[in-house]
Amino acid sequence: MQAVVFEQWKTFPTLKDVERPSPGPGEVLLKVAGAGACHSDVAVFREFDAEHGPAQLQPSYVLGHENSGWVEELGEGVDGIAIGDAFLVYGPVGCQHCAACSRGQDTYCQNAAEMPYLASGLGRDGGMAEYVAVPARNLVPLGDADPVAAAPLSDAGLTPYHAIKLALPHLAGGGRHALVIGLGGLGQIAVQILTAITGATVIATDTKPDAMARAERAGALTVPGGEGQAAAIRELTGGKGVDAVFDFVGAAPTIQLSAAVAALRSRITVVGIAGGHYDWNFYGVPYETELTSTYWGTIEELHEVVALYRAGKIVPENEYYALDDALEAYRRLEAGELSGRAVITPHGR
Ligand code: NAD
Ligand code: ZN
């Protein structure tokens, strides 16, 4: 079968013929419906190497950590799952028995150091292929919802959902404000989730006008970058500042912007992995402002994301690519030319 393979550190992936996987014990084989191209993959194939980055990301493997598909075949010991049914895949794969995995949070598996991979498409073969084998436990049912359009939910939906849920105490009540910085695959869905599950006023910004126009259509107020941006955002909050900031870039200037607009007792979540430095000090942010990072989400939360999708409250805006054009999708993602999540559809739409 055809697959997008990450073959060597610091090397753009290749499209090549590989053997079709067969599901191991406890696994299922999925016929891939959709595989999203996430900006983290760019870090995987451009920035990391044996010295810098998680050792489990050592190539070679099939990329694609944001997947959906139809059950094609059951591995040994798997039952209660019907062939042909559509599922979203929870990407992270931990030891499956520690305390973190037991609560469905494989991202924080306590035995991660001994695991040979982090997730489907991150150290083990992922979904940018005609077929992918995944643990049956990682399947989240989609029912009669469209599995092709749903693919980005497993990361571009789940990651902001997890970050927003942890920030809910800051957004509950009247007169609250949220800020979304970076309106790409994750940021656009973040705007939709904030609108769906909080009563906060959502403010958004991006360097691209078309991305801001899209966020406005989803209910956000937008403020362009440039001089006076922090003051303009603060003005939209009536001067008090933003209660919860979600930074989907994570560069030094966006973390600085986050700190500059934060309210007293607010929360800043850096989601983007640009690795920007921020020089924290006691006087740098308002009192009791939390500054934190985040990583993906839990299986339970993915069920909740699917519920929002099935209720029409999350509508991923995707650009579809055949498997033959997957490398072009990555090229455009890297060049900032996409205006929606790139979803690879190995079996068409
Ligand atoms: P994307 O390329 O789809 O979107 C990035 C957006 O940020 C683009 O719209 C771009 O125009 C905008 N942008 C870039 N620089 C900006 C700036 N200085 N100010 C304002 N906007 C700016 O990327 P994505 O797939 O949505 O991923 C976003 C980030 O989140 C990436 O860094 C990715 O690696 C990271 N990520 C983190 C997690 C996690 O668990 N923490 C999970 C998935 C992705
Ligand atoms: Zn574990």
Image (cartoon, rainbow, N blue to C red):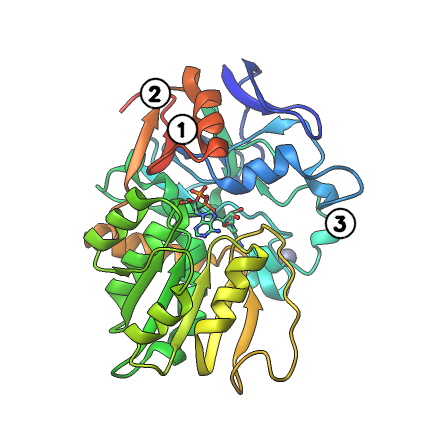
Disc 3: which residue = 114
Q: Which of marks 3 and 1 is nearer the N terminus?
A: 1
Vertical order, 331 against 169 (above or below)? above
Q: What residue type is labelled 3?
A: Glu
Seen as rendered, the residue at the extreme front is 227
Do the numbered discs 2 and 1 sit on residues whose CB atoms are within 8 Å?
yes
Of the numbered discs in the image, which one, if any, rests on residue 59? Answer: none
Q: Where is residue 349 in the image (x, y as percent from the top left)?
A: 26, 25
Q: What residue type is labelled 1?
A: Val
In the image, taking residue 231 as reference, residue 248 lies left or right, namely right
In the image, taking residue 268 as reference, residue 56 lies left or right, namely right
Residue 149 occupies quadrant: top left
Residue nearer the viewer, 97 or 225: 225
Query: Circle 2 sits in a helix, a strand or a loop, which is it?
Result: loop
Query: Marks 3/1: CA distance?
Result: 28 Å
**Residue sitting at x 28%, y 41%:** 317
Query: Circle 1 sits in a helix, a strand or a loop, which is it?
Result: strand
**Residue sitting at x 33%, y 50%:** 188
Residue nearer the viewer, 253 or 176: 253
